[in-house]
Amino acid sequence: MRTLLSFCLVALFWLAPCSPVFANSYWCEGDLLIAERTNLGQEAIGAVLEPIPNSSDGTVPGDGILLHWRDLSLQLPRTNNAGPPSYTDGRWWWRVEDADHPEFRQRKASIETYACEAQVEGANPLNNRNS
C-alpha cells in the first residue's frame, strides 16, 4: 500500500508540470481574481487522428478552470454549451466571451452576477484598482 501511494505521489508531481495552464488576472467586485485554464481533457485523450467534437478556443470536454477569488478556490469543469467555453459546477459559472469583461455568476436563491474586468498590465495589485 505504501509503495502504491509513493508511486502515485511521484506520478502526480511528475505529470503536474506537463499540464498546460493558462492564467489571467481580473478584478471582480473590487477583488483580484486569478483564472487558470487547464487542458486536462486533451491530456487524458492524447493524440487523435480526427478532430475532437465540441472543441472550442483550444479546449475540449474534460478541460477545466481554476478560479482563485477572495477566500475561494473554485475548480469548474468545462460545459458542453455551444459558443465560447464556459465552466460551471452548477452553482458557480464562468465565461470569457469579452476578454475585458468576463461573466462570473453564482446561483443562490437567485442568480448573482459579479462585475469583472481584465486587470490592466502593470497595474499595482495591492491597491485593488486598475490604475
Image (tube, helix red, strand yellow):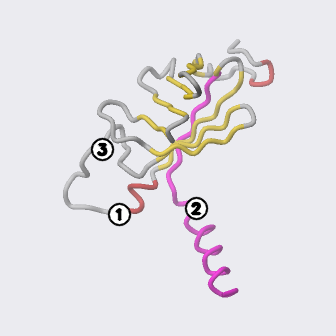
Quick check: 32 left or right of 20?
right
Quadrant placement of the N terminus: bottom right
Was residue 4 drawn as part of the magenta stretch in this picture? yes
Q: Position of residue 88 (x, y in %)?
A: 48, 38
First of labels 2, 3 by sequence position: 2
Q: Which numbered circle lies on residue 16?
A: 2
Mark 2 residue crowding within 10 angstroms, few (<14) / some (14–19) / many (20+): few
Who is closer to the viewer here, 111 or 74? 111
Quick check: 2 left or right of 42?
right
Q: Which residue is mark 1?
A: 46
Quick check: 11 left or right of 99?
right
Q: Which residue is mark 3?
A: 55
Q: Secondary structure at mark 3?
A: loop
Q: Amino acid at mark 2?
A: Ala
Q: Which numbered circle lies on residue 60?
A: none
- Number of numbered labels in the structure image: 3
Query: Magenta region: which residues?
Result: 1-27
First of labels 2, 1 by sequence position: 2
Q: Amino acid at mark 3?
A: Ser
Q: Are marks 2 and 1 in contact (CB under 8 Å)?
A: no
